Amino acid sequence: MTTIVVVRRQRVKKPTIADTVRLNRLCWFGQIQRMEENRISKQVLYVNLETVQLRGRPRNGWQDEVMEDGRLVGGKGWKEKVYNREEWKKLLKKNKELSHSAYANGMNE
């Protein structure tokens, strides 16, 4: 880790925007997953739009980002924890506290 990042963490003592966005995205994902199938929000999340594929590497979609975030935060079996609201909240809260304490102490992620 670069010296600039370590110094920033020691001075600011707050998680980065990326960490905050990651946890908020997972919180929202948990809410959507627990919704009934007929809710518009859940239908929109899983709609498959037929679009023309651009040249080059495919862009990451929202679901790709959520899958990566879930793997980072919850490890294996994180998808099953989504349906148990209390367990999901506990997992997100633990990760939020870990990121806050890591930044307060100036430690690596």
Image (cartoon, grey):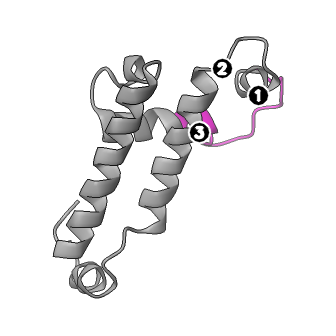
Between tags 1 and 2, which lies in front?
2
Does residue 42 lie above or below 68 as drawn?
above
Does residue 1 lie above or below 21 as drawn?
below
User: The magenta stretch spans which residues?
Assistant: 48-65
The quarter of the rendered structure image containing the C terminus is bottom left
Q: Are marks 1 and 2 in contact (CB under 8 Å)?
A: yes
Q: Residue 35 shows which numbered tag? A: 2
Question: In x, y percent, where is residue 76?
Answer: 27, 24
Tell me the kind of residue under disc 2: Met
Question: In x, y percent, where is residue 6?
Answer: 22, 79
Q: Which residue shows up at 36% across the image and 74% down it?
A: 14
Where is mark 3, residue-wise? Answer: 28
Where is mark 1, residue-wise? Answer: 41
Dot placed on the residue nearer the N-terminal end, 3 or 2? 3
Dot placed on the residue nearer the N-terminal end, 1 or 3? 3
In the displayed orientation, state which residue is furthest to the front.
86
Tell me the kind of residue under disc 3: Trp
Would you say residue 51 sits in the magenta stretch? yes
Q: Which residue shows up at 33% across the image and 37% down it?
A: 91
Q: Quadrant of residue 80?
A: top left
Residue 64 versus residue 40: which sits nearer the camera?
Answer: 40
Does residue 56 lie above or below 38 as drawn?
below
Q: CA distance from mark 1 to mark 3?
A: 11 Å
Label 2 element class: loop
Label 3 element class: helix
Q: Quadrant of residue 4?
A: bottom left
Tell me the kind of residue under disc 1: Ser
Label 1 element class: helix
Q: Which residue shows up at 69% across the image and 13% down it?
A: 36
In the picture, measured across the screen, residue 6 lies left or right of residue 47, that is left
Q: Main secondary structure of the magenta part?
A: loop
